[in-house]
């Protein structure tokens, strides 16, 4: 059932639904012309309610609160005019929320599919991570209490949570497996690889893993909570030369550890370099990591993963990569910490990838001239012209 006072918006939602479910039976209600639904409206006979922002004289959040206060009311997906309203809607019990101005079709369909699969289940809200409507994540993970949603992607979401048995803050990364989604099974396998790769490592500059759980079509990793923010935030505020050198050394030490056991990170960027409260660095997010000796069937040969700003030339062109690709990414981060700028910019991802491959290594200002030789060796276009082992970065510094 779609409830909104704008005919065009109702038609848009109908189009989203019927393009995926041509036989869907959709009821539409206009609260502007017909008035607000009465308090006794129970939503009976509907699988899902889509609640738009135009509710006539009624506040849409008040309408939502009316619905979610009714026992057994169907799941409500709320469409808000801005992100703040969406957050309020989720606090009021919406099963999910999306911006009304721009509705991502795939995200909506994945979310509705999940709600349809779980509509007959009754679960405790203390144990249910509702997740983000854009990811379709709806896992039941016992023993953890949700505090805050930190990040979402197509297949996974990250939450700040509390482990009830120990009353400590942890970070939960949750992956939903959906074989119907493109690469759904491959993403699930990569996620489980992530745990297998890093759980056995014990290094000060690598995030600590506490627990892994697999249930039905979800898996989760409970990892150390890092309360000091990330390197991306610190770069925005400016980093001293002393701290730039220290941070580079600690990241290099972490890379040396993972490379020594045959792991590539493949998505090294400031957002994946976190800080503990004591100021020490911990490398995170090995979702793209891969043992050098693993076959290509899990990641699909030729598919590009990673962030273009920090990609090596070979990774940007989907060529085979090794430890020298991570060394290149470290060079990009080193330059950004020194200057506050990224070495290569363009209007689109392919433009950035082209510059990584063809543009000259940027020249540092006289203040940092002593590091130009190191930068040249980190950002060399050909892997054979770079430093070959990350330990050499430590030696140079």
Image (tube, rainbow, N blue to C red):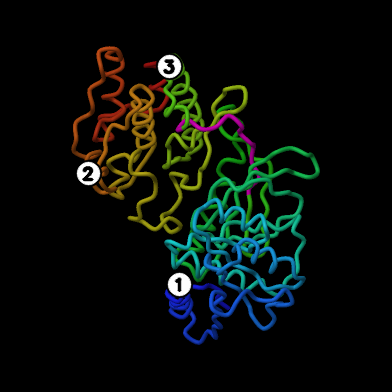
Q: Would you say 384 lies left or right of 47 here? A: left
Which callout, 3 or 1, points to the residue nearer the camera? 1
The reply to whether callout 2 and callout 3 are in contact (CB within 8 Å) is no
Please, which residue is most extreme toward the right here? 165
Q: Is residue 232 placed above or below 244 in the rendered structure?
A: below
Find the distance from the CA under tag 1 to the CA under tag 2: 41 Å
Q: Quadrant of residue 208?
A: top right
Under circle 1, the secondary element is helix
Under circle 3, the secondary element is loop
Which residue carries the number 3 mark? 240
Which residue carries the number 1 mark? 9
Q: Is residue 193 placed above or below 20 in the rendered structure?
A: above
Q: Earlier in the sequence, mark 2 or mark 3?
A: 3
Which residue carries the number 2 mark? 354
**Few, some or many C-alpha atoms within 10 Å of disc 3 (few <14, some 14-19, many ≥20)?**
few
Which callout, 1 or 2, points to the residue nearer the camera? 1
Q: Residue at x 22, y 22 (%)?
A: 363
- Horizontal and vertical percent for residue 88? 62, 54
Q: Residue at x 31, y 27 (%)?
A: 378
**Few, some or many C-alpha atoms within 10 Å of disc 2 (few <14, some 14-19, many ≥20)?**
some
Q: Would you say 79 lies left or right of 12 here? A: right
Q: Is residue 239 placed above or below 208 in the rendered structure?
A: above
Q: Earlier in the sequence, mark 1 or mark 2?
A: 1
Q: Would you say 271 lies left or right of 367 here? A: right
Q: Residue at x 64, y 36 (%)?
A: 225
**Few, some or many C-alpha atoms within 10 Å of disc 1 (few <14, some 14-19, many ≥20)?**
some
In the rendered image, residue 107 lying in the magenta stretch gets the answer no
The reply to whether callout 3 and callout 1 are in contact (CB within 8 Å) is no
Under circle 2, the secondary element is helix
Question: Which residues are the magenta region?
Answer: 221-232
- The quadrant the N terminus occupies is bottom right
């Amino acid at each position: 059932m779609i409830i909104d006072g704008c005919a065009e918006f109702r038609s848009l939602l109908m189009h989203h639904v019927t393009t995926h479910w041509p036989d869907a039976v959709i009821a539409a209600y206009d609260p502007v012309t017909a008035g607000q639904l009465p308090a006794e409206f129970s939503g009976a006979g509907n699988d899902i309610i889509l609640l738009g922002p135009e509710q006539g004289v009624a506040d849409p959040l008040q309408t939502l609160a009316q619905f979610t206060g009714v026992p057994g009311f169907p799941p409500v997906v709320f469409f808000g005019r801005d992100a703040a309203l969406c957050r309020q809607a989720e606090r009021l019990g919406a099963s999910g929320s999306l911006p009304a101005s721009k509705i991502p079709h795939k995200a909506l369909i994945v979310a509705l599919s999940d709600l349809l699969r779980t509509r007959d289940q009754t679960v405790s809200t203390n144990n249910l991570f509702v997740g983000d409507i854009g990811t379709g994540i709806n896992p039941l993970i016992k023993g953890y209490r949700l505090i805050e949603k930190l990040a979402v992607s197509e297949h996974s979401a990250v939450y700040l949570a509390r482990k009830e048995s120990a009353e400590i803050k942890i970070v939960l990364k949750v992956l939903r497996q959906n074989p119907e989604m493109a690469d759904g099974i491959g993403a699930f396998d990569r996620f489980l690889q992530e745990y297998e790769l890093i759980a056995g490592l014990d290094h000060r500059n690598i995030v600590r893993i506490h627990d892994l759980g697999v249930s039905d079509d979800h898996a989760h990793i409970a990892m150390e909570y890092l309360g000091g923010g990330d390197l991306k935030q610190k770069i925005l505020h400016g980093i001293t030369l002393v701290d730039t050198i220290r941070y580079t050394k600690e990241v290099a030490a972490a890379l040396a550890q993972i490379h020594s056991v045959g792991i590539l990170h493949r998505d090294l960027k400031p957002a994946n370099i976190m800080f503990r409260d004591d100021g020490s660095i911990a490398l995170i997010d090995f979702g793209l990591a891969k043992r050098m000796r693993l076959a290509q069937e899990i990641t699909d040969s030729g598919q590009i993963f990673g962030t273009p700003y920090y990609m090596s030339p070979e990774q940007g062109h989907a060529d085979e990569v090794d430890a020298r690709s991570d060394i290149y990414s470290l060079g990009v981060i080193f330059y950004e910490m020194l200057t506050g700028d990224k070495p290569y910019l363009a209007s689109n991802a392919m433009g950035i990838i082209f510059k990584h491959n063809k543009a000259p290594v940027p020249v540092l200002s006289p203040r940092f001239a002593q590091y130009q030789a190191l930068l040249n060796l980190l950002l060399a276009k050909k892997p054979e012209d770079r430093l070959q082992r990350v330990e050499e970065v430590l030696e140079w510094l």
